[in-house]
């Protein structure tokens, strides 16, 4: 049997030795594990390897340090130059290969570099994720409930209701079995570190990264207790992390931002001590603290720290050291209590270029050096002291058992700078999965086109790669950092929200731009966005539309993520966050969910058709490795239906998927492996001997035909039958 010998001339900036990763060989279908086998130096820039007993193979040349070619396939000996051309003879005697190498968008081998990056380490592609805002999920300890000073809901009697800080770790521990019954194996929680702002219940205004916010914990329900209780049920914890910014008060023990104490603030026309703002009777200082203040930073100036505890009601006259004005003074410049002067920030910790406005949102430099909002002050993330502080703080939580990290506001930190943080955490905890939020309301292809008005260096795919060519994702390899799949999400406005898959294939055809598309975290909606209208609302489409998109998310490449409440169409059609000046959380997609989880209602919640649908999808995906980690190939889409193949480890797990939306569909897929296929949905069995598989799919259901598979998994439900 002939051997296959290939030669490769590496670019000058590649590391050595050059390696070859190959798969899908003929004969045998063998494969290497990433990054593959080292090649042999043969002089004048060329490297060589002979693959014994192999006639043809798909392959990627790489240096094991992030640089690689695009996917190639070779069926005879040859020389591949860095210019992207195969030759039948070495340079100087070359004859161009008659069949050119496959150009982009040829997808790279999706399972080539699993996020574990080593034997025996976890592979997060095997998980499915339930995302929740801890303070809005389930209240297990009313004693730690807390009202933010903004957006307070009052009843008809003028009494404050619905504390913003309502859910807590004790409540989450009490409902872990609910999440496990739904079939999820990982929980993504909003940032649990201590926060400070007028509306900080969500966790994205960090004040002390080293401390868990006490409004989440109880004596018998600490963060460690939550981690341990989740692990005891086989559930992983994903901690949300803010790297880009701090709250407007600085960082406790590290840096101070100049403000007057809020307890001295008196609105125009009001009188000190008579301000009625619900629990903030008297003043806007923290009503739950004896000293009625909003900050306890030891780096505050002496006058501030002296007033911190001595004058709890904020009545004793205080001279503003900046202006000389004496407070409390009704209507005195609110900016001295709440605002930020960027020019006075400590440059050791913060950027000083002002606030994002206008066209800044689509330009890398202002997006990454200006402040996101008045309560999100842009950190100088490139400075070593900032790195040391945040990296060290998060390492502590990894040591406690946190299993994965989600990074907030990714595009607001320059890629290579952000990867310093990501790589430090991955080095501290080998096998750690880290993904991030790079919000875009569109395909997010950047300089590759597709109607995108933003450059590649602020788009999701850029952060999954290591190259520096904004028009060539293959100029660099996989960065090892995954992202939320906003590109696929953005198509749902024009596809599933209209009862069609039309156009979904177009975005999936661009998977080659990502470092590893099987690690993308896919979703229908989250706490910021939904697919309807201007992306601001909880999904308002018909129930069958939601079921159809879940069928896609649970069978296509990527790691599915569900936002709490989707399983019962919670707050359907509501804005995801407050929009109007008088909106309160109970009118939004962030309303308190715990009423549906109360003992007297939880059975009703668990009987909802979408709850049962998602539970079965989780069971099916968990049983079929191809749906978790397999390369996605042969994607076909025709509006009312879709089909594709998921192939993991060269046929070790192999599934042919057909999806329908709106009506029954007939699915035909050619070029598949021969053998016996069994449908995980219906249990139907089909023998394939000619490479062609055909099967019917009921409306809004799926056919998941697994080669030598187990057959039906779970019982028929309304949308899987």
Image: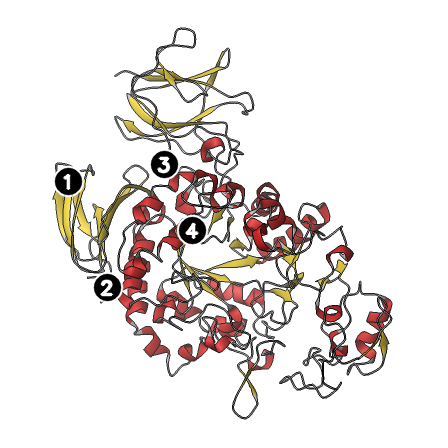
Label 2: state its secondary structure. loop
> Disc 4 vs disc 1: which is toward the camera?
4
Q: Nearer the viewer, residue 642 or 557?
A: 642
In the rendering, at what x and y percent does residue 226 appear?
A: 53, 66
> Measured along the vertical axis of the image, is residue 692 above or below residue 348?
above
Q: Residues within 10 Å of mark 1 (few under 14, many from 20)?
A: some
- Give residue 493's position: percent from left, percent from top: 36, 58
Q: Residue at x 21, y 60 (%)?
A: 662
Residue linked to disc 4: 442
Between marks 4 and 1, how big is the CA–CA gap?
35 Å
Q: Is the Cβ of the residue at disc 3 closer than 8 Å to that at disc 1?
A: no
Q: Secondary structure at mark 3?
A: loop
Q: Give the Cα distance between marks 4 and 3.
A: 21 Å
What residue is disc 2 on? 719
Left or right? Give the position of 699 relative to 180.
Answer: left
Marks 3, 1: nearer the viewer: 3
The residue singled out by tag 1 in the image is 692
Mark 1, secondary structure of its residue: strand
Visible in this render: residue 485?
Answer: no
Q: Label 3 near label 4: C-beta < 8 Å?
A: no
The answer to whether 187 appears left or right of 715 in the picture is right
Q: Position of residue 599 (x, y in %)?
A: 40, 81
Between the C-alphas of marks 3 and 1, the distance is 23 Å
Q: Is residue 326 left or right of residue 230?
A: right
Colour treatment of the image: secondary structure
Q: At 53% from the left edge and 81% from the top edge, which residue is drawn? A: 162
Q: Nearer the viewer, mark 2 or mark 4?
A: 4
| Residue that mark 3 sits on | 107
Q: Is residue 164 above or below residue 381?
A: below
Quadrant location, the N terminus: top left
Looking at this view, is 487 or 191 the one in front? 487
């Amino acid at each position: 049997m002939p051997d296959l010998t290939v030669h490769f001339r590496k670019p000058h900036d590649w590391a050595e030795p050059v390696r070859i990763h190959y798969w899908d060989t003929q004969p045998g279908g063998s494969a290497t594990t990433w990054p593959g086998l080292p090649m042999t130096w043969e002089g004048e820039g060329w490297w060589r390897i002979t693959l014994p007993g192999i006639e043809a193979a798909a392959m990627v040349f790489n240096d094991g340090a992030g640089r690689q070619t695009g996917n190639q396939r070779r069926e005879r000996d040859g020389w591949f130059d860095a210019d992207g051309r195969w030759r039948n003879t070495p340079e100087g005697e070359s004859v161009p290969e008659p069949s050119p190498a496959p150009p982009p968008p040829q997808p790279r081998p999706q399972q080539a570099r699993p996020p574990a990056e080593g034997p025996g380490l976890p592979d997060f592609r095997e998980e499915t994720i339930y995302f929740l805002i801890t303070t809005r999920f389930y209240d297990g300890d009313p004693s730690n409930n807390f009202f933010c000073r903004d957006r307070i809901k009052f009843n008809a009697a003028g009494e404050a209701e619905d504390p913003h800080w309502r859910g807590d770790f004790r409540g989450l521990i009490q409902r872990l079995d609910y999440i496990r019954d739904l079939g999820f194996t990982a929980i993504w929680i909003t940032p649990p570190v201590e926060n400070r702002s007028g509306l900080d219940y969500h966790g994205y205004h960090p004040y002390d990264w080293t401390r868990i916010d006490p409004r989440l914990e109880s004596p018998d329900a600490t963060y460690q207790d939550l981690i341990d209780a989740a692990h005891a049920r086989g559930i992983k914890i994903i901690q949300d992390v803010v790297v880009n910014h701090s709250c407007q008060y600085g960082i406790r023990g590290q840096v101070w931002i100049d403000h007057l104490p809020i307890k001295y603030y008196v609105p125009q026309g009001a009188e000190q001590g008579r301000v009625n703002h619900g629990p903030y009777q008297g003043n806007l200082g923290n009503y739950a603290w004896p000293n009625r203040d909003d900050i306890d930073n030891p780096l505050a100036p002496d006058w501030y720290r002296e007033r911190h505890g001595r004058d709890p009601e904020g009545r004793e006259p205080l001279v503003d050291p900046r202006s000389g004005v004496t407070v409390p003074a009704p209507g005195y410049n609110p900016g001295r209590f709440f605002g930020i002067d960027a020019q006075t920030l400590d440059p050791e910790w913060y950027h000083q270029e002002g606030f994002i406005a206008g066209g800044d949102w689509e330009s890398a430099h202002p997006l990454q050096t200006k402040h996101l909002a008045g309560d999100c002050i842009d950190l100088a993330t490139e400075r070593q002291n900032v790195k040391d502080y945040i990296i060290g703080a998060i390492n502590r939580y990894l040591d406690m058992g946190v299993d994965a990290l989600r990074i907030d506001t990714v595009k607001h930190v320059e890629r290579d700078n952000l990867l310093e943080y990501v790589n430090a955490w991955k080095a501290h905890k080998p096998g750690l999965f880290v993904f991030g939020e790079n919000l875009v309301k569109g395909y997010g292809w950047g300089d590759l086109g597709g109607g995108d008005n933003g450059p590649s260096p602020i788009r999701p795919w850029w952060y999954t790669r290591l190259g520096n060519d904004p028009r060539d994702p293959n100029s660099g390899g996989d960065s090892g950092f995954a992202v939320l799949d906003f590109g696929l999400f953005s198509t749902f406005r024009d596809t599933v929200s209209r009862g069609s898959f039309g156009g979904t294939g177009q975005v999936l055809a661009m998977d080659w731009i990502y470092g590893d598309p099987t690690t993308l975290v896919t979703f229908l909606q989250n706490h910021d966005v939904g697919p309807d209208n201007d992306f601001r609302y909880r999904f308002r489409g018909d129930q069958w539309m939601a079921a159809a998109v879940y069928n896609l998310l649970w069978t296509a490449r990527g790691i599915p993520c569900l936002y709490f409440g989707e399983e019962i169409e919670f707050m359907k059609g509501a804005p995801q966050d407050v929009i109007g000046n008088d909106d309160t959380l109970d009118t939004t997609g962030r309303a308190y969910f715990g009423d549906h989880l109360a003992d007297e209602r939880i059975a009703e919640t668990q009987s909802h058709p979408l709850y049962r649908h998602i539970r079965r999808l989780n069971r099916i995906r968990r049983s079929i490795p191809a749906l978790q980690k397999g390369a996605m190939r042969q994607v076909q889409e025709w509006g009312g239906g879709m089909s594709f193949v998921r192939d993991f480890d060269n046929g070790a797990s192999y599934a042919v998927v057909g999806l329908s939306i709106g009506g029954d569909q007939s699915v035909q897929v050619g070029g598949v492996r021969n053998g016996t296929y069994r449908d995980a949905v219906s249990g139907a069995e089909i023998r394939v001997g000619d490479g062609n598989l055909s099967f019917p799919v009921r409306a809004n259901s799926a056919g998941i035909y697994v080669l030598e598979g187990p057959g039906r998994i779970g019982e028929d439900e309304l949308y899987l039958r």
